[in-house]
Image: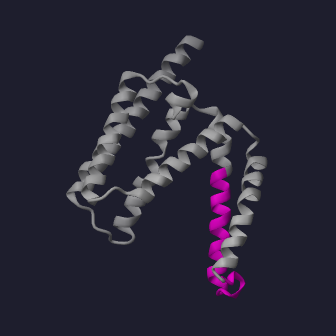
Amino acid sequence: FGLIFFKERLTRPQIIAILSAVIGVMILTLGYGQFPIIAFSLAISFAFYGVLKKKAAAEPLSGLFLETLVTLPFALLTLGVTDSQPLAMPTGALLAIIMLGIATAVQLMLFGYGMPKIPFVYVGILQYIAPTLTLLLGIYLFNDVFTTIHFIAFLFIWIAVALFTVSGLSAGKIRMKKVS
């Protein structure tokens, strides 16, 4: 999306990194046995969210307030349709939901703050950090299965992130030398 919407350019190592990430995702998809429509929908919708966030360049707190205001009717409708009674929940569960809401709001605010400051292609590659952390939590906290297919796929993804990071750091050093 950085290439399409913001006319960003990639270096050769960055192109190789993206191809490596694509291979990793394709391996995971083939290993899954069917097209992961929900995961794909989330990735595409969050990418469009990032494009809108970057183009709007709104102040993070104001932007988050407006986003929350827009989604509020949908949340209220969902509560009404599902006949949910959130205040009847156990106190611990209610507090956990409130804390998760705060954690999400802080992340979205930081995302809104950082989005205008970095190239969009970097945002895309950084999005591979969350699945890696989720993978680690799944393996070490929830004893999920980590197959050879997972290993190969994530190896391609980790190589992509490392290559993209080294490429970005090298480009930053070159820019810093030109400025000095």
Residue visible at 28% across and 49% down in the picture: 153
Looking at the image, residue 167 sits to the left or right of residue 1; the answer is left
Residue 163 left/right relative to 108: left
| Along the viewing direction, whichever of 75 and 169 lies nearer the viewer | 75
Q: Quadrant of residue 69?
A: bottom right
In terms of image quadrants, where is residue 125? top left
Which region shows up in magenta? 84-108
Percent across and percent down for residue 44 are 50, 47
| Residue 5 in view (yes/no) | yes
| Label total for image | 0
**Residue shown at the point (57%, 28%) measured from the top left:** 6
User: In the rendered image, is residue 180 in sight?
Assistant: no
**Residue extending farthest left:** 148
Residue 142 image point, x, y percent: 38, 72
- Residue closest to the far front: 81
Is residue 15 shown above or below 57?
above
167 up-or-down from 143: above or below: above
**Quarter holding the C terminus?**
top right
Q: Position of residue 84 (x, y in %)?
A: 66, 82
| 97 relative to 114, above or below | below
Q: In the figure, is residue 54 to the left or right of 122?
A: right
Please tell me whether residue 103 belongs to the stretch shown in magenta: yes
Q: Residue at x 70, y 78 (%)?
A: 80
The residue at 57%/43% (across/down) is 48
Q: Position of residue 18 (x, y in %)?
A: 37, 35
Whether 99 is drawn above or below 58: the answer is below
Would residue 68 be counted in the magenta stretch?
no
**Image color mode:** one colour
Q: Main secondary structure of the magenta part?
A: helix
